[in-house]
Image (tube, grey):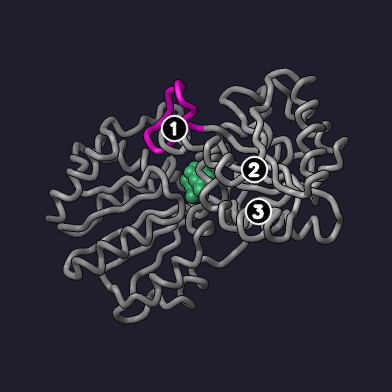
Amino acid sequence: MIGADRFVEALKAAGVDFFTGVPDSLLKSFCAYVTDTCGGSHVIAANEGGAVGLAAGHYLATGNPALVYMQNSGQGNAVNPLCSLADPDVYSIPMVLLVGWRGEPGVKDEPQHVKQGKVTIPLFETLGIPAEILPDDDESAADAVRRMAGLARAESRPVALVVRKGLFAEYRLRDRRPDIAALPREQAIEDILKSLPEGAVVVSTTGMISREVYETRERLGQDHSRDFLTVGSMGHAVMIALGIARAQPNRRVFCLDGDGASIMQMGNMAIAGQSGCGNLTHIVLNNAAHDSVGGQPTVGGAIGLSAIAESCGYNRPGSPVFREIRVAKGARGDLGRPKEPPQANKKLFMGTLA
Ligand SMILES: Cc1ncc(C[n+]2csc(CCOP(=O)(O)OP(=O)(O)O)c2C)c(N)n1
C-alpha cells in the first residue's frame, strides 16, 4: 500500500501541483486527501473529458502538467480530448492521468467493470499513451511519478499511472460538508416507488440509487420487472428513459438520477427538456455528493437544477416533468446489490415493455 500524502508529495516534487478529475472508489483515499489538503489547486470536474480540458488550460497558462484522476469507466469520456486536444499529433499537451483499474482481469468486480477492466491497458496502448501500473510501495511509486511526469514533460504528451484495487492506504475525507437535506435517499426512493402510477417503469442511475431501488422493491415484496437498473453509463439514464418514453408514449417513464450523474452529462437535460415527451419524469436525488464513491462534493448544492431543467423546457404543458428532491448523503451499511446479472434485468424489463 502507498500513502496518499506521500504520493501527492511526489507529484508536487515532480512539478505536478494541480489536480482535477472525477472521483472513483479505488482512488477514494487519494481523492479525499486532495479534497482536504489541496484547496485552490483542486477541481472536481463534471466529467473526465472536462478534466482533460481543464488540465490542458492549466498547462497553457503555467507550462506545468496537471494530474487528471478518474475511474477507468471515465476513459471513454476522456478519449476525445485526449486524441483531439492533448495528443502529440495535435497540441501535444503533457498531463499525468491517474486511473483506478476497476474490473482488472482476475479480480472479482461488478459486471459493469468487466469489459472496461479488460480494455484499460490496451486502450492506452491504442491511444499511444505510455501507461504504467503504480507500484505498491511509497518509494517505487514516487520513482514512477518522477519517471512518468518526466516523460510527460520531455515528450509533451499525456501519460498514465494505473491504480490497482487496495493500493492506497485508507485516508478518510475530513471535509464532510453538511447535508443539504435530512431525508435519507432510500426513504425518498421508497416514497417514489410506492406512488408510481399503474404500468409505470423506472430507469435508475449508476451507483447506490439503483442498489436502493432494487432493495426497496425487495422490502416492499415487489418484483424487479419494472426497473432498468443502469449499472454503468453514468449520466445517460435519462436518455435511456427518453428512448423508452418516445417509443411508448402511453407509458409513464420515471428516471431516478443522481446529481453527480445529471451534472456529468447535463446536455442530456437540454435534449430531454425539448423532447415533447410529457410521459417522462426526471427526478434528481440531489445530495450534493458523489456518494457512491466516497461522498466527494459536487456542485449540486450550489446550482439551481430545477431552474436549469425549466429553462431546458421541462415542466411546461406536454413536456417532461422535472423534480429535484434534496436528500442526505450516506446509505445503509448493509446495502446489497442486484442479484441478477444485467442481461437478466434487461430481459425481464423488456418483458414488461412488450
Ligand atoms: C464515467 C464514469 N465516471 C466515474 C464513475 C464512478 N462513479 C460511480 S457512481 C459515482 C457517483 C455518482 O454520484 P451521484 O450521481 O450524485 O449519485 P450518488 O452516488 O450521490 O447517489 C461515480 C463518480 C462512473 N461509474 N462512470
Judge whether 318 appears above or below 340 on screen.
below
Q: Residue at x 45, y 50 (%)?
A: 234
Mark 1 vs mark 2: which is more N-terminal? 2
In the image, which is nearer the foreground, mark 1 or mark 2? 2
**Residue nearer the viewer, 140 or 168:** 140
Main secondary structure found in the magenta portion: loop
Mark 3 vs mark 1: which is more N-terminal? 3
Residue 38 visible in the current orientation = yes
User: Are there few (<14), some (14-19), or many (20+) residues within 10 Å of tag 2?
Assistant: many
Q: Magenta segment range?
A: 102-113
Say which mark, if any, is on residue 252: none
Mark 3 vs mark 2: which is more N-terminal? 3
Count of picture labels: 3
Residue 92 percent location from the top left of the image: 74, 55
How far separated are the C-alphas under marks 3 and 2? 17 Å
The secondary element bearing badge 2 is classed as loop
Are discs 3 and 2 less than 8 Å apart at CB? no
- Of all residues shown, which one is farthest toward the bottom? 317
Left or right of 332: which side holds 230?
A: left
Residue 291 visible in the current orientation = no
The secondary element bearing badge 1 is classed as loop
Question: What residue is shown with label 2?
Answer: 129
How far separated are the C-alphas under marks 3 and 1? 31 Å
Q: Is residue 111 magenta?
A: yes
Quarter holding the N terminus is: top right
Say which mark, if any, is on residue 332: 1
Q: Residue at x 20, y 59 (%)?
A: 197
Judge whether 206 appears above or below 134 on screen.
below
Amino acid on which disc 1 is placed:
Arg
Amino acid on which disc 3 is placed:
Ala
Are discs 3 and 1 less than 8 Å apart at CB? no
Question: What residue is shown with label 3?
Answer: 51
